């Protein structure tokens, strides 16, 4: 899942064509996932998964401790974090492994895969990123994603 999170963040950085910090790309990926899943399962379902993903991610990335999930499922406090690196197109695929944004997105993707299954997760990803190919990638568990 971490590889997929890397790719989604890199895609958002390159699609934005700006040198925005990691937090901004993380917010864009998170919002796309939130919009995609909330439309299918509802805001409460997404908020619940996001809360669980953030709770899990905080143990791996202590920099996420100030981040919270709002009642509508949106992230609060992520934009206030100082990014560990400056993200630009040339560095988009070189995120540090411990980066909070990657950890959070990877945890959220893992929960989506676990609770929704591969087919629905891939459909959500394709809806959010129609130009990106997802079925030729392998996740950590040998599944396509």
Image (spheres, rainbow, N blue to C red):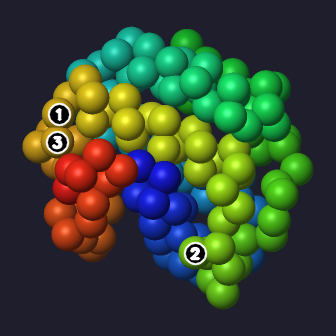
Tag 1's secondary structure? loop
What residue is rendered at 58% in x and 75% in y? 93
Q: Which residue is mark 2?
A: 93
- Contact? badges 1 and 2 (CB < 8 Å): no
Q: Which residue is mark 3?
A: 118
Identified at 29% across, 46% down, the residue is 141
> Mark 1 or 2 closer to N-term?
2
Q: CA distance from mark 1 to mark 2?
A: 27 Å
Circle 2 packing at 10 Å, graded few (<14), some (14-19), many (20+), is some
Within 10 Å of disc 1 (Cα), the crowding (few <14, some 14-19, many 20+) is few
Determine the image quadrant of residue 20: bottom right
- Give the mark count: 3
Q: Residue 4: x and y, percent?
A: 41, 58
Residue designated by label 1: 117
Mark 2 vs mark 3, CA separation in Å: 24 Å
Local SS, label 2: loop
Locate residue 12, reporting x and y percent.
52, 66
Q: Are marks 3 and 1 in contact (CB under 8 Å)?
A: yes
**Quarter assignment of residue 49:** top left
Q: Mark yes or no: residue 6 visible.
A: yes
Mark 3 crowd level (few <14, some 14–19, many ≥20, 10 Å Cα) = some
Q: Residue at x 48, y 52 (%)?
A: 2
């Amino acid at each position: 899942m971490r590889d997929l999170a890397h790719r989604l963040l890199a895609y958002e950085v390159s699609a934005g064509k700006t040198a925005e910090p990691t937090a901004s790309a993380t917010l864009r990926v998170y919002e796309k996932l939130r919009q995609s899943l909330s439309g299918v399962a509802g805001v409460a379902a997404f908020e619940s998964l996001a809360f669980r993903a953030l709770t899990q991610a905080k143990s791996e990335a202590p920099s996420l401790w100030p981040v919270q999930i709002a009642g509508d499922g949106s992230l609060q406090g992520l934009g206030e974090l100082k990014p560990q690196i400056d993200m630009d197109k040339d560095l988009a695929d070189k995120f540090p492994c411990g980066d909070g944004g990657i950890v959070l997105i990877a945890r959220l993707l893992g929960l989506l895969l676990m609770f929704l299954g591969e087919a629905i997760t891939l459909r959500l990803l394709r809806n959010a990123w129609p130009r990106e190919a997802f079925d030729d990638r392998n996740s950590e568990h040998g599944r396509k994603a």
